[in-house]
Image (spheres, grey):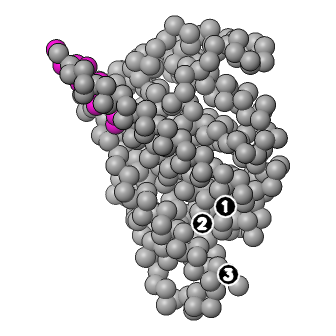
Amino acid sequence: MHLQPDELIDIAEGTRPLSAFPHLTACEMCRMQVADLRSTMSMAAGVEVPEPSPLFWNHFSVRVRDAIAATPEGNTWRWIWARFRVPIALGLAPAMIVFGMLTARLMDSSTLPSPPSMVFIAHPPPPSAALPDDSSFNLVADLAGDFDLDDAKAAGLTGQGSAEHEVTHMSEGELQELHRILKEEMANTGD
Amino acid sequence: MCALCAAPAFAQGRRGANPESAVEQGVSPAEIQRMFDSYALLQAQQQLQISDDQFPQFLTRFKALQDIRRKALNEHARLVQEMRMMLQQAQPDEAQLKDRVKSLQDADARNQLEIKKAADAVDQVLDARQQAKFRVFEENMERRKLELVTRARQNRKQQQH
């Protein structure tokens, strides 16, 4: 029986020795999987992660905490929408464009745009540019139209616009809570 | 079933075998990013109905795609940040600016190619229906992760009151 993914990862990470899996000596496929994983991890380890400007994030964190603290209980979602509707729209607009493009290309397996990088790199085309006449898209485009990247960054939804980037701005307590939620979500997924 | 085993291992990353230790010792953004990867993997396995036969290859290729995207975003952000710093100078050097713009264009183009290659590699493991689902899944997953971030912040705020 081939090695399970968790076993492959443990071997690749060095947390369990090769000798613990005699199957590896006889199975080229499993050995290749381990080699692939090691190569991927080595590549990931070489990635330089730039530090954001400390001053900017300090200011941002203070602003967000102050604003949340000033929010009346029970109105959090309304406040979030009121405060961040335009940056949220800015974040959603490219995603909707990507979704539209993908829908049009679903049958073409030779093209695979990458949503996160497109959101980050590509400028959204004008609403009229060969996109379906979708009212929700137009609404998002209208909302986002007069906001530039700096406004989005100031709102915490940066050009990266990703959850991973948001994570870099969270306090330790928030990270712990997110850790707990994620564990819960993953356990539920397995049910 | 494979994913259930793989995800905690992903999440643990280099932290070892004790998943509780992160909570006790504090959780880093990198740890959360690894958990996001595991979460995405679990969800993909379920939503795309990845078979046990497909899973080992899907696992490595999906992770490679995630890593390459992360590298591309970081590289882009670093170059933009460098340009921002240069533009804050009273007399920015035009030749240097031009060089940075060129570097950014080159990096974006190179990374797009790498992402495309990694995405193609994922596609090779999937059938046509799974390829379509994968595209929809990626859109939904990013939204879901942002929801979880928001929920964590709200919960934390409530805990403090």
Q: Secondary structure at mark 2?
A: helix
Residue closest to the eye, B154 or A162: A162
| Residue A84 placement (x, y as % from top left) | 51, 18
Mark 2 surroundings: few (<14), some (14-19) or many (≥20) residues within 10 A: many
- Are tags 1 and 3 found on a single chain? no
The residue stretch that appears in magenta: B78-90
Calculate the distance from the C-alpha at mark 1 to the C-alpha at mark 3. Answer: 15 Å
Q: Which residue is mark 2?
A: B6
Residue type (three-letter) at the residue carrying disc 1:
Phe
Q: Which residue is mark 3?
A: A2
Q: Is residue B94 left or right of residue B3?
A: left
The quarter of the image holding the C terminus of chain A is bottom right
| Residue A59 placement (x, y as % from top left) | 29, 24
Mark 3 surroundings: few (<14), some (14-19) or many (≥20) residues within 10 A: few
Calculate the distance from the C-alpha at mark 1 to the C-alpha at mark 2. Answer: 12 Å
Q: Is residue B13 left or right of residue B49?
A: left
Residue type (three-letter) at the residue carrying disc 3:
His
Q: Which residue is mark 1?
A: B58
Q: How many marks?
A: 3
Magenta stretch secondary structure, dominant: helix
Residue type (three-letter) at the residue carrying disc 2:
Ala
A176 above or below A16? Answer: above
The quarter of the image holding the N terminus of chain A is bottom right
